[in-house]
Amino acid sequence: MTINGEQLDGVSATTLWTLRNRAVEARRPDAVIDDPWAVRSYDAISYDYDRFGTPSQTHPLRALALDHAITEYLAGHPKATVVALGEGLQTTYWRLGSPDVDWLSVDLAPVIALREALLPMQPRITSLPMSALDRAWMDHVDPADGVFVSAEGLFMYLDRADVFALIADCAKRFPGGRLFFDSIPKWFSDRTLKGMHLSKRYIAPPMPFGFSVSEAARLPREIPAVAGVADLMLPFGRGIWGSRLFRVAMDLPVVRDWRPMMTLLSFA
């Protein structure tokens, strides 16, 4: 089966960028991630992946960081619901061993259709073809046993007001839950607004939401029911991503607010 990936465009097409990076990494003999469904999906989609430039470890390592965060939460909340906002072609559910929990996959209709064509049907997964900003998905969540919300590779494409409003609504609706999201610094956001070339043939979509570690630390004071903030580091990889010295440097006060970040929020 071969599927034409050109049906996706704009922000939706970035799921092919992250898919390519995970699949290429998973194929390496020294891979940092085991992601067979990413490899199968990558092979099944006809697309000019080279337009995304050189593959990077950052997306596979980000995926692993999310895996660890969900696993930790499910250890204490084994009947929790996981909500993957803007899930794209992420394969987190299968990397976690197909956990026996309710899993909601929220994305736009063309992306959901592609997921359903590529990935195996699972009775615990409910696909919701809608925008993450459409709060109707919240009505499908039973918060009684805990809720973990992921927004992997999503918030940077939204407006700041929309991000804060969504965080506030999640905190209010899902007490005791957690929210994982990643973000980029303002200088990087500004660069995308001017047109950031990943290659000569591809310009990344604008990413208007720039955010910093210091701003994230203020969220409990700014958004009711946000009880805690954790700044997560990427798991160790190869090369510079395996350097402990580099990790220490990236966490220095003068550097911290200039790097991309992953944030894990805890709700009261």
Image: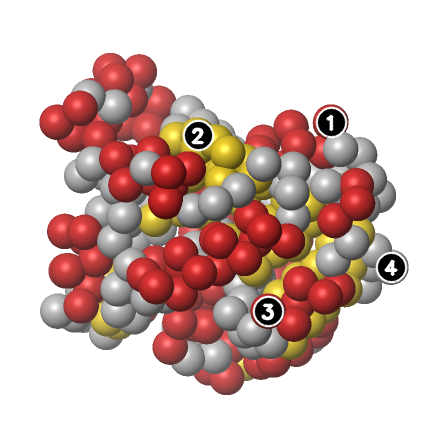
* Circle 4 SS class: loop
Q: Which mark is residue 84?
A: none
SS category of the residue bearing label 1:
helix
Q: Percent position (x, y) of residue 55?
A: 35, 50
How far apart, in angstroms, are the residues tagged by discs 3 and 4?
Answer: 23 Å
Image height check: is 189 above or below 182?
Answer: below
In terms of sequence position, does the residue under pointer 4 or pointer 1 come before the other?
1
Vertical placement of 125 versus 48: above or below?
Answer: above
The residue mark sitting in front, 3 or 2, is: 3
**In the displayed structure image, the side of residue 22 where residue 245 appears, left or right:** left
Crowding near the residue tagged with mark 2, few <14, some 14–19, many ≥20 C-alpha atoms within 10 Å: some
Residue 148 point in image, percent of width and height: 64, 44
The mark lying in front, picked from 1 and 3, is: 3
Q: Amino acid at mark 2?
A: Ala
Amino acid identity at mark 4: Pro
Left or right relative to 188: residue 31: right
* Residue positioned 42% across, 37% down in the render: 220
Could you tell me which quadrant the N terminus lies in?
bottom right
- Quadrant of the image containing the C terminus: top right
